[in-house]
Amino acid sequence: MRHLMSPLDFSVDELDKLLDLANDIEKNPAKYAHACEGKKLATCFYEPSTRTRLSFEAAMLNLGGSVLGFSSADSSSAAKGESVSDTIRIISCYADICAMRHPKEGAPLVASQKSLIPVINAGDGGHQHPTQTLTDLLTIRSLKGQLGNLTIGLCGDLKFGRTVHSLINALIRYPGIRFVLISPEELRIPSYIREEVLTANGIPFTEVERLEDAMPKLDILYMTRVQKERFFNEEDYVRLKNYYILTKSKMELAKKDMLVLHPLPRVNEISVEVDDDPRAAYFRQAQYGVYVRMALILTLLGIEVN
């Protein structure tokens, strides 16, 4: 039995197979429509979510399975003090696979150690968000045709942004990857990622504060929101929340084939006027999230469709 706690739980070969499966699901949805009949997915979300929870549910329903779960800690026995370990033991009696989001780093890992069914980390605090990373990889590979030899700009909250941390860890395994890290001083990438991931692996990167300075050299711009829920005080959040806003005029500085990605939700870091730009790929990215989660559910359940 396998779990998914980090994008690094899959080798590059396994990732390629997973992304190939997701592309096949995109092209041939009817072929997979009954693959999970009789199977149940539990969505255990201790933290609010729209895209991740609903895309997991859509993925399982598209596969012919069914879904049960809760959408906040308040609506679960966690409100009564039940531990994650006990909750997953109970969930294991009801479902075949579980997707768990939790505000505490490492909580899905604890669950996986006690679980009788595969557990997918659907986001744990500011730590990892592996299925968003799988979504990002599928989007880049599908729209760019490759995952190597790209200059990727990561913009906004690089300190608390778990999507950014996961994506860096996943992409450094491909050749010719370069990063431009765009953030204010207070939201710079954590030192352990700078030193233990980027520097230790010889990955070229630059750190800049102005988005305009980075735009002309990027193949991918990955925007993130400044996350209010990760701040310790309102004053810092208010000061930094509008630090970066991607506008039509800034898009004029970019390559004709640059892609703009965003894990969503956005607040106002991408102006709605950018939505009509053919390089804006964030809504397509959300659709790719359903395909990749379908592929992941099939893979972890060991279901092959011929």
Image: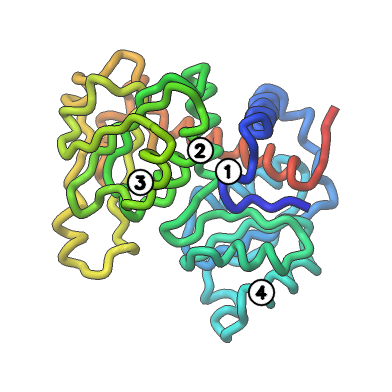
Residue at 32 percent of width and 37 percent of height:
154
On the picture, is 94 further left or further right than 120?
Answer: right
Pair 1/3: label in front: 3
Eye-nearest disc, 1 or 4: 1
Q: Nearer the viewer, mark 2 or mark 3?
A: 3
Q: Amino acid at mark 3?
A: Glu
| Residue 111, placed above or below residue 293 | below
Q: Name the residue: 40% across, 44% down.
A: 164
Q: CA distance from mark 4 to mark 2?
A: 28 Å
**Coordinates of residue 127 in the picture (x, y in percent):** 45, 56
Q: Find residue 8 and name its label.
A: 1
Residue 260 x, y percent position in the rendering:
35, 29
Q: Is residue 130 left or right of residue 240?
A: right
Q: Nearer the viewer, mark 3 or mark 4?
A: 3
Labels 1 & 4 near each other (Cβ < 8 A): no
Determine crowd level at label 1: few under 14, some 14-19, many 20+ residues with C-alpha closer than 10 A. some
Q: Amino acid at mark 2?
A: Ala
Q: Circle 1 — which element? A: helix
Residue 113 screen position, x and y as percent: 69, 65
Q: Compute the Cα span from label 1 to label 3.
A: 18 Å
Q: Which residue is mark 2?
A: 170
Identify the mark nearer the N-term, 2 or 3: 2
At mark 2, the secondary structure is helix
Cα distance, mark 2 to mark 3? 16 Å
Marks 2 and 1: CB-CB under 8 Å?
A: yes
Return the mark for residue 85: 4
Q: Residue at x 69, y 37 (%)?
A: 295
The residue labelled by disc 3 is: 195
